[in-house]
Image: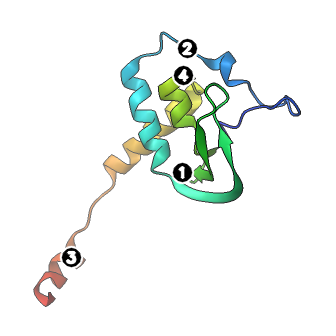
Amino acid sequence: MLGFWGTPDDRTLPNPAALVDAAWDETERQWLPDYQDHAQVAGSWMGASSCRFCARVNGSRDLTDGYYPWPEGPGHYVLAHGVRLPAEFFDHIEQRLQTLEELARDGTWWRQNAART
C-alpha cells in the first residue's frame, strides 16, 4: 500500500513532508498521477481525506491496480508538492504498462460481428 500517511495519533505510516523531492524530474511526475487516477475503486469511505500540506480535499475512495492499494490523493501530492513515491512502485508501473503493450490483440469476434450491425 502507498499514499497512506501517518497522523498525530498514528505515526506508523510515513509523513509526506519527509518524501518531498524538489529536484524530481517533472516528466516522471506527470504520468504517475494519470496511472493512479485510472485505477479501480477498491473501497469508499464516509469522510474525505485532506492534503497534509494545503488542506485540499483529496477524495474518499481507495483505488487499486490489482496489486497496490492507494487513496485518491497521491497524484495531488506528487504534482502539487513533489512527494516522491517509492522506486518499487515506478518499476511496478513500468512492468504493467509494458505487459499491456505486449498483449496480443484478437479482433476476430469484432470483425465477424461487424456485418450484423
- Residue 68 visible? The answer is no
The three-letter amino acid code for the residue at tag 1 is: Asp
Q: Is residue 25 visible?
A: yes
Q: Amino acid at mark 4?
A: His
Q: Residues within 10 Å of mark 4 (few under 14, many from 20)?
A: some
Which residue is depicted at the point 24% across and 78% down?
Answer: 109
Marked residue nearer the N-terminal end (1 or 2): 2
Residue that numbered label 4 is attached to: 81
Marks 2/3: CA–CA distance: 47 Å
Which is more foreground, mark 2 or mark 4?
4
Q: Residues within 10 Å of mark 3 (few under 14, many from 20)?
A: few
Which mark is first along the chain, 4 or 2? 2
Q: CA distance from mark 4 to mark 1?
A: 23 Å
Relative placement, left or right, of 109 versus 1 is left
The kind of secondary structure element at disc 3 is helix
Q: CA distance from mark 3 to mark 1?
A: 27 Å
Residue under numbered circle 3: 110
Q: Is residue 104 above or below residue 82?
A: below
Query: What residue is rendered at 81% in x and 32% in y?
Result: 7
User: Does dot 1 land on a helix, a strand or a loop?
Assistant: loop
Question: Where residue 21 is drawn, which disc sits there?
Answer: 2
Whole-percent x, y for residue 4 in the image: 70, 37
Q: Is residue 98 above or below residue 100?
A: above
Q: Which residue is label 1 attached to?
A: 65
Judged from the image, the secondary structure of the residue bearing numbered disc 2 is loop
The single residue placed furthest to the front in the displayed view is 55
